[in-house]
Amino acid sequence: MKGVAALLAAAALFVSAAIGGQPGDSVNDAAIMSDGYPPALSAFGFFRDLKTRTPATRVTGYHLNTPLFSDYAEKQRYIYVPAGQPARYDAQGVLAFPIGAALIKTFGYGAGAAFRPIETRVLLHRAGGWVALPYVWNDDLSDAVLKRAGTRMPVMFTDPSGEARTISYQVPNQNQCKECHALSGAITPIGPTARNLNDGRQLQALVAAGVLDRAPGDAPRLLRWDDASAPLADRARAYLEVNCAHCHRREGAASNSGLFLLTSESDPVAQGLLKRPVAAGRGSGARDFAIAPGHPENSILLYRMESTEPGIAMPEIGRATAHKEAIALLRDWIAAMPAENGSQQQPGGH
């Protein structure tokens, strides 16, 4: 009888997990793998304590050398992989995550204990591919609810220069998630590449945590865009790769633009140097080239990064402000390029 009781208790626990309960400190693999869309973040069990966002066992935090800019929001990032199924190392692209993996990213404002979450986006690797879902936090931070249609909300914060900002913060809808995460027509993660994870210690830590299968000593490294000790051109290229190249690459959603901003791109014109727009319009700002060497004021790239106007601003979604510190970096980079014989100068050269 005791054995039957134990089986019934285990079955009840599984059912509770499948319908959104949190069985202690375990991730709900059924919620990740099923075809449905759980209405609340708590259904996944990624956090043992939602209010403090304390991760469950085997939900591992990570950071990126150069992160995507999102209206100065702070981000808390986590990876989950099923037991005994680490992601496979890839020197060039995103780590190869197993079926059943999840990437969890919480956006908010404030540092340390003052951090207040706004939304958590999850990428779930199901049998049919990756699924992107946005969850918005309740006022009391007791849970976050699914907002497949997205939403907007007023947000006040202070930027790194001390300027007070008030913006209409955008939580993307599910289709907008697909716009940024589309690669060769399929949804894929963007941030967790070996290059952007490699800070000299993190890849090894992920191996130790069972998240990654190996960490070669010669793993490539993407620079931090804000590392003033690093070469200016390399910092600029790192920023453009992370913030633009998920679309502006040969397999990306903006492949028809002919502007490809991966640091591995070898064609200087494709990188933007003296490159004319495919279709001139108001997005060009009456400028001739994506990057005009020696002339940031004549460069379409900066014009679009400085704008917040729909139809002009780049990236098209995910921001209501201009990233003034990064714009200053890119302005200095373009200004330092020799204006003469510009067609022979590689944008990433230094």
Image: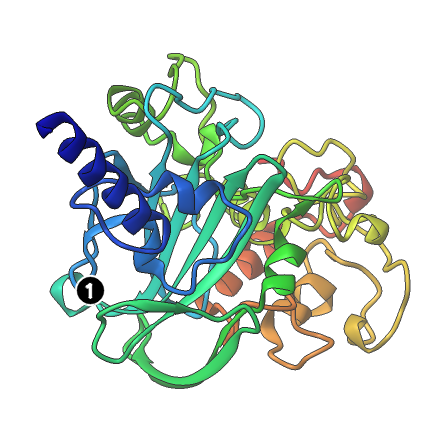
Placement of 199 over or under 142, stated as above or below: above
Placement of 174 over or under 34, stated as above or below: below
Figure colour scheme: rainbow
Residue at the (47%, 20%) spot, across then down: 89
Residue at the (23%, 51%) spot, across then down: 22
Mark 1: few/some/many CA within 10 Å (<14, 14-19, 20+): few
**Residue highlighted by disc 1:** 111
Q: Secondary structure at mark 1?
A: loop
| Quarter of the image that includes the N terminus | top left
Q: Position of residue 127 (x, y in %)?
A: 58, 34
In the image, farthest residue toward the right: 279
Residue at the (28%, 51%) spot, across then down: 16
Q: Position of residue 265 (x, y in %)?
A: 70, 34
Amino acid type, mark 1: Ala
Compared across the picture, whether 176 is left or right of 53 comes to right
Q: Quadrant of residue 307?
A: bottom right
Compared across the picture, whether 110 is left or right of 39 comes to left
| Quarter of the image that includes the C terminus | top right
Towards the viewer: 297 or 68: 68
Q: Is residue 75 visible?
A: no
Placement of 156 over or under 276, stated as above or below: below
Residue at the (77%, 53%) spot, across then down: 254
Q: Quadrant of residue 176?
A: bottom right
In the image, farthest residue toward the left: 2
Q: Position of residue 334 (x, y in %)?
A: 62, 55
Compared across the picture, whether 123 is left or right of 247 comes to left
Towards the viewer: 89 or 131: 131
Q: How many marks?
A: 1
Q: Position of residue 225 (x, y in %)?
A: 44, 48
In the image, farthest residue toward the front: 1
Q: Is residue 31 visible?
A: yes
